[in-house]
Amino acid sequence: MNEQCFVTGGTGFIGQHLLARLTAKGHPVTLLLRKPAALPALQLLVEQHGGKGSLLTAVAGDLAKPQLGLDASGLRQMQQAKVVFHLGAAFAWGLSLEQGRAVTVNGAVRVAQLAAEHGSRLLMVSGFMLENQAHLQRIGIDLNDPLQTDWPALYRRVGGYEGSKLEAHFRVLDCMHQLGGELTVVHPATVCGDSRSGHILPAQPLAELISNLASGKLSAIPGSAAHWLPLVPVDFLAALMVAAAFDPQQVGRQILALDERTPNLAQMLEVLAAPLGVQAPRRFLPIGVLRWLLKIPGLPALLRTSPESLDFIQTTRFDTSATKALAARHQLAWPDLQQAMQATARFVAVS
Ligand SMILES: NC(=O)c1ccc[n+]([C@@H]2O[C@H](COP(=O)([O-])OP(=O)(O)OC[C@H]3O[C@@H](n4cnc5c(N)ncnc54)[C@H](OP(=O)(O)O)[C@@H]3O)[C@@H](O)[C@H]2O)c1
C-alpha cells in the first residue's frame, strides 16, 4: 500500500533524505512549505538522493501561524495523510526563547493536534539528548512532571534551540496523551552525511565541525578521551523513520537513532582529517575551559563554535538494543560509519 504522507521540514537536511526514501517506496507526499515555489528545486534534489520527485506536492504553510497557516484545501490534504512526519524546527544557535517557542514548540503542538484530530499517525523527530536522563536532570528538567520544568531557566542554560526541542517534545507527548493520538518519536544522534554520497548541508553541526577541522580552527579536542559525539548517517536515519512510521508495533514508542560504533571524538577527528589531508588535533581541552573561553566576546565567531553545541559532546553511552531489533526486523543494514564519515568530509571539502 502506498499510503499518503504529510511532511513538515521537507526542505531541510533530514527532510530531503526522508522524502527520497518515502517516494522511492512509492508514497505520495504533501509538503508543508513556507515557500511552495521551492517545490521544483526540491523535486530535483530528491531525485538526486534516489527518490521520485513527481510524487511530491506542496501546500503553503508556516509552523508559527495558527492552523499552521494552512487554508481549507491545505487542511484537507493534511487530513488525507496516513502518517504526518514532523521535522520542521527553528534550527540555529543563539535563538531566543520567543523564537524557539513560536516555531518549534507551538508548531509541534499544532501539528500534533491536527494529526490527532485527523486520525493520522504522528512521527515526530526529537533528539538523542532526550534519552540521557542524567543530562536532563542536570539541566533542570522535572523528570516526574516535565511540564512543570522552569522553562525560561532551562532555555537560559541550554539555549533557544535545545530548550525549544525539549519543551516541544514534552508538550507533544502530553497533547497526544490527552487527545488519544498515535505517536512515534525518533531521537536522532548528530546527523552524518549520506553514507554513499556524503551529502550534507553546510549549516549542519557535523559539517561545521569538519569545516573547522579543514581550516585549522580546531586546534584541540573538546573534552577528554572518553567524550564522543554520537552519529547516525542521514540515509539510515531516513530508512529507520520510514520503517517505524508504518510499523504498528512502534506506536507509543521512542526510538534512538544512533550508531553505537561511533568512535570517541579524538578518533572521529582522525577519521575525518584523513580525507581532508590535515592533521587532527592531539591535545584535549576540557569542556568547562572551552565553555569559559567561549564567553570571551568575539571568540565563538572566531572559532566558529557556539557554547550550545558543546552540550552534545558527552561521555554517556546509550542502550540501542531496541533500535537494532527494529532495524533487523525491517532488514535495514547499518552503513559502514567510517566510510560515511569520510564521504561526508570529502563532500564538505568540495562544497
Ligand atoms: N541535524 C541533526 O543533527 C539533528 C539531530 C537531532 C534532531 N534533529 C531534528 O531533526 C529535525 C530536522 O533537522 P534538520 O537537520 O533537517 O534541520 P534543517 O536542515 O535546519 O531544516 C529545518 C526545516 O524546518 C523548516 N522550518 C523552519 N521554520 C519553519 C516554519 N516557521 N514553518 C515551516 N517550516 C519551517 C525549514 O524550512 P525552510 O526551508 O522554510 O527554512 C526546514 O525545512 C529538526 O526537528 C531537528 O531539531 C536534527
Image: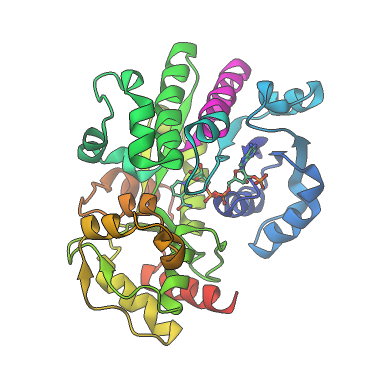
Q: Residue furthest front?
A: 297
Tell whether 44 sits left or right of 187.
right
| Residue 132: quadrant of the picture | top left
Instruction: Residue 138: say if magenta.
Output: no
Seen from the viewer's position, the closer of residues 225 and 154 is: 154
Q: Residue furthest top?
A: 178
Residue at left offset 32%, top offset 80%: 280
Main secondary structure type of the part rendered in magenta: helix
Q: Which residues are magenta?
A: 103-125
Tell whether 167 sits left or right of 265.
right
Residue 112 x, y percent position in the rendering: 54, 24
Residue 5 x, y percent position in the rendering: 65, 36
| Residue 149: quadrant of the picture | top left
Rendering quadrant holding ligand 1:
top right
Looking at the picture, the colour scheme in use is: rainbow
Residue 155's place in the image compared with 145, above or below, is: below
Residue 68 x, y percent position in the rendering: 67, 27
Seen from the viewer's position, the closer of residues 307 and 75 is: 307
